[in-house]
Image (cartoon, grey):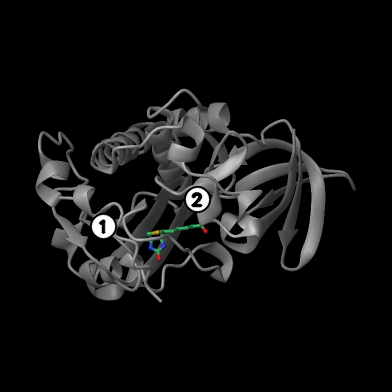
Amino acid sequence: MANVNRQYDNCLLDPDKITANLKTKRIGRKILVYDSTSSTNDIAAEYARNKQNDGMVIFTEEQTAGRGRAGNKWLSGRAESVLCSIVLIENKFHAELLSLTCAVAVAETIGRTGRSRAKIKWPNDIMLNGKKVAGILLESKTLPILKSKIYVAGIGINCHQKKESFTDELQQIATSIDAESHSISDRVLLAKRLLSSVDHWLEVAANNSEKVIDRWRELSIQLSHRVTLIFNGAKFTGHCIGIDPEKGLILQLDTGGIRMFEAAHTSVAKSSS
Ligand code: BTN
């Protein structure tokens, strides 16, 4: 059920404020802000049927059926987060590279808001001080009529949540920008920076994908650390030695050998530093 908290109603997302002086080439030329919707990824997927909507962004103040990776729900109180989905119609990028690019863009956006630097936990959890502050759900479809692949990059950034906003279980692993910075973040500014950052990093990826990988490496909390992954129900533990823009995370397995793990079929059981 939708959360009826109206505490932040005097600073709702405003499309005109988000687009004012927005200097992006591709992302955010069309923006819609919903008051409430099921999932912005579903709305974006409908708009993605039209090639003209490449770069369009759907924001909402709340979702009644927000979803995360691996079939998880994505919960957020009304106006507490930046919740959005970006339509990307493309043939250039493999899903893994797109996923890494979005993770770098979101981490950099959040990193600019305060003293703490945001980090990436593969595939695309964004962490502040060791807790998850944002997530990205990349969904794709092939529409033969468009002769292109359609991607929807759904992004949820926790902004105003207090510790008590999370369940006891989540308090150990989730946080918000405000909780970490002890201030109140400006969601409009964050939304603007997010669109600029996604626009910038997509352009970098198109021209030189190695630059995205290099930045991902710098922001990764797992690179050079031990990681346990679950792939097709089986556990794999090893030392993270790299990332491949098409094939995913590369582990030097404890059992011997090197193996790559695609984000779509893998979850992280444990990362240690
Ligand atoms: C994850 O870390 O599990 C991904 C979370 C993605 C959440 C965002 S919120 C906006 C968009 N709409 C959704 O239903 N999900 C994504």
Report if the CB atoms under discs 2 and 1 are less than 8 Å apart. Answer: no
Provide residue 117's location: percent of width, then percent of height: 50, 27
How far separated are the C-alphas under marks 2 and 1? 24 Å
- Relative placement, left or right, of 136 versus 81 is right
Amino acid identity at mark 2: Glu
Residue hosting label 2? 96
Amino acid identity at mark 1: Phe
User: In what quadrant does ligand 1 lie?
Assistant: bottom left
Residue hosting label 1? 59
| Label whose residue precedes the other's in the sequence (2 or 1) | 1
Check disc 2: other Cα within 10 Å, few if <14, some if 14-19, many if 20+: many
Q: Residue at x 37, y 72 (%)?
A: 2
Q: Residue at x 32, y 71 (%)?
A: 42
Provide residue 224's location: percent of width, then percent of height: 72, 30
Q: Residue at x 72, y 61 (%)?
A: 231
Q: Nearer the viewer, residue 254 or 85?
A: 85
Q: Secondary structure at mark 1?
A: strand
